[in-house]
Image (cartoon, helix red, strand yellow):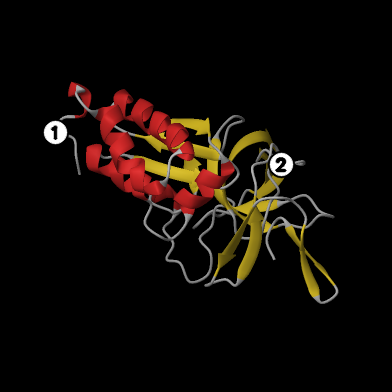
Amino acid sequence: LGSGVRREGPLLVSTRAGVLGWDTESSRLWVEAEQRRYVPVLGDHVIGVVAEKHADEYRVDLGAAAPATLPVLSFDGATKRNRPHLAVGALVYARVVVANKDMDPEISCAAPPGVSSRDWVTRESLFGELLGGYSFDCPSGLCRAMAADAPCPLLEALGAVAAFEVAVGVNGRVWVDAAQASMLILSQQAMLLCHTHPPESHQRLVQTLAGGSDGYRGEGG
């Protein structure tokens, strides 16, 4: 069971008002609702900010009730002698590996089983530190839509304008990076505006925002 749902005997009960979500592959049920505080759920992909660093772990702010623990060796290919050294304030893209109401959450920057991994030193691993770019808060419902496996009309429309990188945390944080600062601005504007527009209008919205700007010409791909 995901966030917003609990079991009471033979019944599944919603703990908040919102939109019912169902993932067939993982057989996970949840209720999506806008909330100020993120509630960690096992398997969630999140963007965190390193708040403290210790000998064996980092403490990472996810916007939840308690900071998450990130063990220093929870990176693909990390060893005691060869591991990332994150500074306080660094951004990390990670997945939730422990989510229990009686324990602080734990996250990992290592690829899950069944997913090919690349050593953190290559900067090509799925999870890890997010360098450069720009991060901002985004409605959690939109973040979940962008992070879903199904094609996202908004991201496809932005990709048609210019090349960019994006990491989406379902804890309501987005990181984008692009060669041009104008693309960072466009991405943020489009993501925040499209939340109130139906998916079929996202392409037109992006085109309207980008239209007539020399900063985007010749950068599509």
Residue 198 in percent (x, y) is at 42, 45
Q: Residues within 10 Å of mark 2 (few under 14, many from 20)?
A: some
Q: Is residue 78 left or right of residue 216?
A: right
Image quarter in which the C terminus is found:
top left
- Residue 172 shows up from this direction: yes
Who's the residue at 45% across and 49% down the image? 146
Query: In the rendered image of this protein, does residue 81 appear above or below residue 49?
Result: below
Q: Please name the amino acid that badge 2 sits on.
A: Ala
- Residue 56 shows up from this direction: no
Which of 103/12 is in front? 12
Query: In the rendered image of this protein, does residue 63 appear above or below residue 12?
Result: above
Occupied quadrant, residue 165: top left
Q: Which residue is mark 2?
A: 64
Element carrying mark 1? loop
Q: Which residue is mark 1?
A: 218
Q: Please name the amino acid that badge 1 sits on.
A: Gly
Which of 156/19 is in front? 19
